[in-house]
Amino acid sequence: MPRADVVVIGAGLAGLSCAAELAERGARVLLAAKGMATTHWTHGALDVAGVSGAATSRAGIEALRADGEHPYARLAGDVEPAVAAHLERTAAQGLPHTGDLDAPLRPVPTAIGTLRPAAIVPSAQAAAVAPWNGDGLLLVGFSHYRDAWAPWAARNLRRATWPEGPREIRGITVDLPWLERLHNLNATVLARLFDDPVWRQRTLGAIARAVPSGTWRIGLPAALGLERHAEVHAEAEATLGHRCFEVSSLPPSVPGMRLFEALRRRIIGAGGRIHLGFEVVEVERDARRVHAVHTHAGARTLRLLGDTFVLATGGIGGTGFRGRRDGTVEERIFGLHVTAPPHAAWFSDDPLQPHPLEAAGVRTDDALRPPELENVRVIGSALAGMHYLSERCGDGVALASAHRVANELAAPARAAA
Amino acid sequence: MTARAVEVDVVVVGGGATGAGVLRDLAMRGLSALLVERGDFASGTSGRYHGLLHSGARYIESDPISARHCAEENAVLRRIAPATVEPTGGYFVATPDDPDDYLERFPARCAEAGIEAEPVPLDELFRAEPLLNREIRAAYRVPDASLEPWELVDANLASAREHGAQAWRYHPLTAVERGSDGAVVGVRVRDARTGEEKAVACRALVSAAGAWAGQVAALAGAELAMSPGKGSMLIMNRRMTASVVNRLAPPGDGDIIVPVHTVCILGTTDVTVPDPDDVHVTDDEIHALLADGDRLVPGLSGARVLRAYAGARPLYDASAMSDGGHEESREISRAHHVIDHGRRDGIGGFWSIVGGKLTTYRLMARDTADAVAAALGVDAPCRTAEEELPGPAHGDVYWLGDRLAAIEQRGGGDADLVCECEIVTRARLDAALDQRGDSSLDDVRRTTRLGMGPCQGAFCTPRAAAVLDERAADGRLAPQAPSPNAAMRGFLAERFRGTRPIAWGEQLTELWLSAGIFRGLLAVDELPESAEPAATGGEGTHAAS
């Protein structure tokens, strides 16, 4: 039966980066997850603290930690090393980023033509956060690709308050007749097409002919290749003669898939194991400690023994929690107590405003240990006290909490080795 | 605010099934008629019901007149509007909680009302409906069915137009004009989108405003005390039964399951409410519906609920004059009443049609049109029961798989799906907008089912809004239509309104994922009121050369 120093449950950014760091530091780590996680739903920028009004992520963290219930109240010191390690790790896997905690939070365009703040982004989005210095913004969509809305987005952006923004904003739809028979294209399929050098050359050529004169930064659908992303991005800039960046649209998120893949490779490369598609179905425990979890996939049940179990299953969105009709919120693996607002106060009236229930989570001690179980740690968005969508802090909390736990758990493993 | 004069024989107020039926009936008798509706057609009670074409068996005890009406009209609707009816059949079943005496009286009462009710052996019942409670001790088969309200209203309006009638949506009634003898001589309406006031001269006014009939009557100077009965329903994520299932008991809360398209609807509560526009679903109702639903299908309460909604029944208590003290509106008759306000209030040329069921809409329309036609000296008979409604051929009931099969057969670019859950293609969305270019996305939903599936608009809302924008840029969006941005915000708010009351379990996770899309990924909260108009910056499609 599989045995590990640390069993990490959950394959989102928190679980992946925790497993990666543990493996890098010599721990025997096994990551089990019931499926892909919310990386596949994201825009690809690293949300550390894109708090409205904050000039940098560092300032954002300071603002958030002032609320003593926020995960940053105890994790603030972990963010910087965690982010640095993450950027090093992803760069080594061919997914370099720009930015750090002191990089200015700048508005970047969304697929519908609104602005959201970002400071730390993968290279393919770097042109969106660099000062505009008189460049124009050209958004590009493709006919027969239903998830890029460049003309609408451009006309929305022209109404946005965008200090020191682009010289002018345009949005065009480039007709790509060769997409016609491939209906219901999503970003993943498009990215695989871009991986093909022949298809890519033809398509970039068509885009190049549609680019008006002038100096532009070109926003393309976030689908510039999966396997050969760096090559695709470089070729796009060379062919179009302008800097290019990716604009994320509806899931599946290609930038998120690249991130997932980079971390997966890192974990395997460092000697960790990943069981994806294996849902935890049973827990062996006594009053204070977990001894094993059982996972199930297909016909087999596996018993995973570990010294420590890291819960990285996310909150309600990631299905780590289940909100019940009676108004209670259940943590689904270990049954940990979840702090949540009363049922009547779960939602705000406006679907675009934060819901109080988003702050639901597990309260822990400084080691991110829940009160019930001494060899369990809780990381990522299962932690109580944040509104990750409006505070844009989910990635920072994931990385910092993962680092905090990996740092603690790797030390004895290394000592023993 | 220019007043535009229009002259017709009859103005019909209310664009639900009854109003559309009255309009058709009048037009077929050769009268010129105009229907005005304050919102979208079938957006009030007709669009917010459970989808059940009653056999009548539900009302055999509480309301024998209504039961007989339902039985007769059930047969008529199957004949004249086959494309809107899915002939699911229905069962009345006795659970251990249902009274013995009701069960004993049931066959005789059905026979009295002219309803075919055939006893069904239990093993046959459970073979057909394996999820039903195995403690059910008796069952009868009745000719219940599933009825699509939006297509039915559309078909009536289309038929009325073929006979020369007009129908204006988004035109609330603002005033009723009366002559020196007190009779109605005209109405004023306002185009809700443009603010334009329009004057309409008429010889007769019919209020088919249902639960809102009191408000229409007040504009004419009459008092009409409606007792709107709020009915709340839950949409379950899938069909739990293949047929309509009712309980052998006096009507209760969660005692009907109606399979509708890909889902089933569990209904219906009944609470008298003061305001038909204030019909939110309460937690207590949800718990009552699910608890009762478990008696029919054990475990139903643990299944995924997609949405909660409520409608306002157009109940009118003919016996109690306006004291309105009913807690339970179920005792008030479902049968309809044609109120002649000339006789009742001295307001000639004004009728209100109240009460009734969607199943009996045609009968209600007939009785109303009979009264109006007689008063206007027209003796043409009602022909609505004989002439089929326009629509797809017999038996061509919409089934989700049909759409998929059609797409697979055709292929090509127009097969791009805007809404994956309900298989709404770009071509279908365009066709709906070609027909009604002034639609909000919620209006489009009523004709296409856009956004009605499990994700409740998470993916299709921005796609559909972008289609609206593309059409706006090409000048193919009516000027009075909401802007694409407003349409998007409005649709999100509307979808949230129905999800919020039942947001637990998987549907709560779904809500969180859509929040991730709308707030995290797309920052919809930053969306401007409307986009800059097109044709200022060289946008458009660039052909690959």
Image: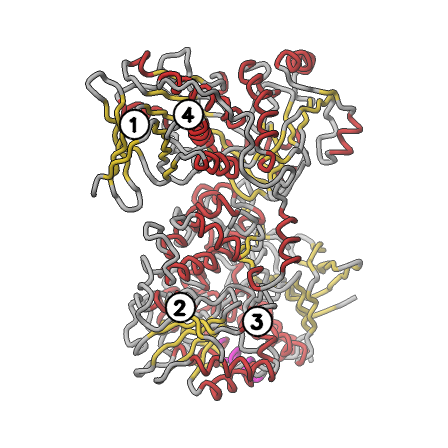
Task: Give the residue at mark 4.
Answer: B228
Secondary structure at numbered mark 3: helix
Disc 1 versus disc 4: distance between alpha carbons? 28 Å
Query: Distance of mark 1 from mark 3, alpha carbons?
Result: 56 Å
Q: Is residue A23 magenta?
A: no
Tag 2's secondary structure? helix
Q: Amino acid at mark 2?
A: Pro
Badge 2: residue crowd in 10 Å (few <14, some 14–19, many ≥20): many
According to the picture, the residue beneath numbered tag 3 turns out to be: A179
Q: Amino acid at mark 3?
A: Leu
Where B363 falls versus B528 (above or below)?
above
Q: Nearer the viewer, residue A305 or B46?
A: B46
Indicate the chain on which mark 3 is placed. Answer: A
Q: Disc 4 to disc 2, how far (Cα)?
A: 47 Å
Residue underneath mark 2: A151
Q: Is residue B166 visible?
A: yes
On the same chain, marks 1 and 2? The answer is no
* Label 1: which secondary element: loop
Circles 1 and 4: CB atoms closer than 8 Å = no
Q: Which residue is at a point 61% across and 66% down the rendered structure image?
A: A11
Of labels 4 and 2, the one closer to you: 2
Give the residue type that dot 4 points to: Pro
Which residue has dot 1 on it?
B202
Q: Are marks 1 and 3 in contact (CB under 8 Å)?
A: no
Q: Position of residue B182 (x, y in %)?
A: 23, 17
